[in-house]
Image (cartoon, rainbow, N blue to C red):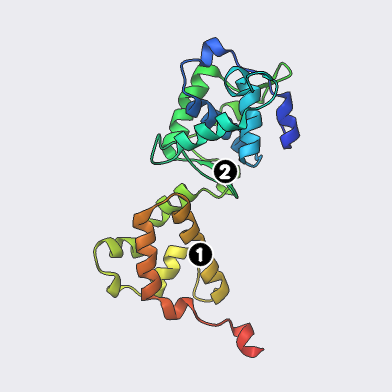
Amino acid sequence: MQPTSPRDLLKVDPKDREIYGNFSLAHLTAYSVHWLIVWEIPTTYENVSVLNARFFPADFGMASFPDLPDAVRTNRSLLQMRPKYRGLATSDPRRGVYLTEKGRSEVARVLKAIGGPTFEGKAVPVEAAAIDPRRPNKNRERTFNPVQLLEDRRTRLLYRRFKEDRLGDTDVVHLLGLLGLYDHTPPVEVRKAFKQLQEAATMVDDADFLQFLAAVGDRFRAYLERPDSSLRRG
């Protein structure tokens, strides 16, 4: 069976605590986040809390009601997963939870130790259980991941020129290269792409990249603030 909606998470079987007991709650939560991503189910706090409680009821179920999720405990583990602590994931209440490269690597260890999920005694398809969490598949590539986005943008020429203190040598073509856009892209879409980078950097508290974007914003302010042709015609 493969879940197609959050309600299907209620059919997940619990794992053996004697097998997973040596892993931290943060590692177990990363395991749950990984499977939500594989199944293309939103990685919201609610969904992570439910799946944690299904996989690991002794650790993520409520004390007097083990069949119900303890969302507070899941939230604490998510906080521990953030970059300034264990560095396994980033999270945002509006978008969900995203594993970092380190988080995907750690999930691989958990997977090797405790295996994949089962639903009412039936194992998930082998191809799903065998997915390497360190290498995103096509489904994951469609998921917004702020850490991966910023890592990719750091390879662009505009960022390298900024680190070399040569931002003055750059042109609009380098800005478009950073954003992955073309010279005929409407101004509103250019601003939207630039704002997405700002939101991603803010989400993961990346001070270096925010400083870079502030400098880029000043350098290309006139280009970024161009009016749309449709507005000029109106």
Residue positioned 24% across, 66% down in the render? 165
User: Of residues 150 and 87, which is closer to you in this image?
Assistant: 87
- Secondary structure of the residue carrying tag 2 is helix
Please name the amino acid that badge 2 sits on: Arg
Residue appearing at x 52%, y 26% in the figure: 28
Rendered image quadrant of residue 52? top right
- State whether residue 135 is above or below residue 179: above
Q: Taking 58 as reference, is 69 above or below it?
A: below
Give the position of the C terminus as an image quadrant.
Answer: bottom right
Q: Which residue is mark 2?
A: 140
Quadrant location of the N terminus in the rendered image: top right
Q: Position of residue 181 (x, y in %)?
A: 50, 67
Mark 2 or mark 1, earlier in chain: 2
**Horizontally, is 127 left or right of 220 in the view?**
right
Quickly name the residue at label 1: 195
- In the image, what residue type sits under mark 1? Lys
Distance in Å between CA atoms under marks 2 and 1: 22 Å
